[in-house]
Image (tube, helix red, strand yellow):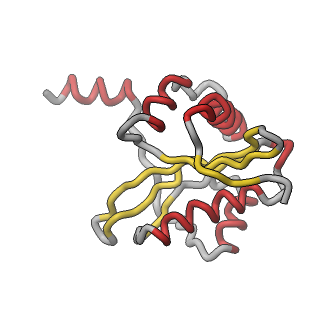
Amino acid sequence: MSFSIRPGVQKDAQAILDLIVELAVFEKEPNAVTITVEDIVKDGFSENPRFKTFVAEEDDEIIGMALFYERYSTWKGKAIHLEDLMVTQSKRGIGAGKALYTAVLNYAYKNKYKRVAWEVLDWNTAAIDFYKSTGATVYDEWRVCHMNEQSLEQFCNENI
């Protein structure tokens, strides 16, 4: 293995943002990312972080990351949401993605979380096949719902 996996630290914020942007491009949403390095530092590496990360590092360069946070399942109890799992394109296929995925699942297991959940695009068959091969269930009947900032504002202003 030519890379190592470790928890992300504040100095990784720019590399984490770069991977988030690369993932947005891969997911055909190149202009969707509006967060900044400052947001990542504040939200991930402050006294009360809102997320955790593991990074894959090769030759002092961040080549991948997994970003996750705690949530709560009314059916199961404490859970983790894996928001992003990303390896830069030039380093795919060396096992970094699986190692990051494994780090998150091991973290969840060791800390007695009851579930790890995430979304995957229906056209990303390589990811779907990978997740299924690890024992994950990929639900076809569930739909992800989002309310963006503009929709939130409009709804709340109309329903005060």
On-image quarter of the N terminus: bottom right
For the image, the number of numbered tags is 0
Q: Is residue 147 above or below residue 98?
A: above
The answer to whether residue 134 is left or right of residue 43 is right
Q: Choose between 10 and 84: the one closer to the eye.
A: 10
Task: Give me the residue at 28% from left, 65% from top.
Answer: 74
Q: Choose between 46 and 50: the one closer to the eye.
A: 46
The answer to whether residue 137 is left or right of residue 156 is right
Q: Is residue 6 above or below residue 49?
A: below
Q: Choose between 155 and 17: the one closer to the eye.
A: 17
Q: Choose between 49 and 30: the one closer to the eye.
A: 49
The answer to whether residue 124 is left or right of residue 46 is right
Task: Residue lying at the far bottom in this picture: please name it.
Answer: 135
The answer to whether residue 113 is left or right of residue 102 is left
Task: Pinpoint residue 81: horizontal percent, then vertical percent.
Answer: 47, 55
Residue 102 figure quarter: bottom right
On-image quarter of the C terminus: top left
Task: Pinpoint residue 90: horizontal percent, then vertical percent.
Answer: 86, 42
Task: Give me the residue at 52% from left, 64% from top.
Answer: 107
Task: Give me the residue at 30% from left, 70% from top.
Answer: 75
Q: Is residue 145 above or below residue 93?
A: above
Residue 133 figure quarter: bottom right
Task: Pinpoint residue 86: horizontal percent, then vertical percent.
Answer: 68, 47
Residue 128 figure quarter: bottom right
Task: Pinpoint residue 64: horizontal percent, then vertical percent.
Answer: 71, 46
Task: Give me the residue at 40% from left, 63% from top.
Answer: 79
